Image (cartoon, rainbow, N blue to C red):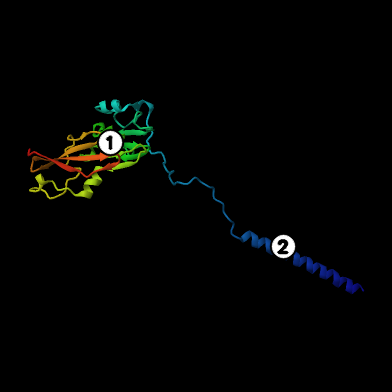
Amino acid sequence: MKREKNKLILVYILMLLVIVLVIALTLVILNNSPKETYKESKPSNIPAVDINPYPTISDECTFDLTLSDYSALTGPKCKGGYSRYNLNDINLGDSKLNIVIIYSDKNGAKSGLYVNNTRVINKADNLLNIRLGIFDNKLFILDKNNNEANVLVYNSNGENVYNLKDTLEEVQIIEPTFQSISSEPINTKTIDQNSFSFENSQFSFQTRLIANNQTITGSKYIVSFTGEDFNDPVTSNIQNQG
């Protein structure tokens, strides 16, 4: 009886030892396992998208002008950076167009002319190179940047309804006066920038080519229009040699 009791005690001791060994082995495994590291969340270095089409300009260099006021300017009101000109009287019928000109003489990335918050001319380092007028309830923009001369026309909804540059590229007009020197069709670089004349039913311009240190004056062309329908340029048969 006593022997059986001793055997039972020994079994219990062995079971306890096994439990202790299991616990110890578990602790060793846990301590030797690689620990998961947690890194502090940091702000992303990806730059934020700039959704503002306009640059930030000080109040001192922001001006609210009428079209007449702007047309009378001979230079910017602020130099050495940006200046902004809001034209507040561009009314076409019952609609008002939001016209903004951002001038920059420092190659500003957002310079140019905006129609209803959309940039339609990408350069404005000389205000005399952007002229505007209202004819037949449409806004006409004469762009004389980059030694070219282009005409853009917008309706009362701010939609572009005419682009002279695109038209000339499409119709491929050969100027007879230039044929002995160049066979290239006329384009916005072969237009006399100072020859434009605008009326309520048409506008006109004259071609000019500079070659061999000579200025050759070509034909006068007329673009007639009714509403938003513009005809191709046609010559008025007025030619001069200069």
Inspect the image, locate mark 2, and give the three-letter code of the amino acid beneath it.
Ile
Q: Is the residue marked by circle 2 packed among few (<14), some (14-19), or many (20+) residues within 10 Å?
A: few
Of all residues shown, which one is farthest toward the front?
226
Amino acid type assigned to the residue bearing label 1 in the image: Phe
* Comparing labels 2 and 1, the label whose residue is closer to the camera: 1
Percent position of residue 89, x then y: 34, 28
Residue 31 horizontal/vertical position (percent): 64, 59
Residue 19 picture location, percent across and down: 75, 65
Which mark sits nearer the N-terminus, 2 or 1?
2
Residue 121: horizontal and vertical position, in percent?
30, 39
Query: Could you give the CA–CA distance between mark 2 and mark 1, rounded to whole angstroms?
Result: 89 Å
Q: Quadrant of the C terminus?
A: top left
Which residue matches tag 2? Answer: 23
* Displayed quadrant of residue 152: top left
Q: Find disc 1 in the rendering and name its residue.
A: 140
Name the residue nearer the viewer: 51 or 222. 222
Is residue 111 among the parts visible in the rendering?
no
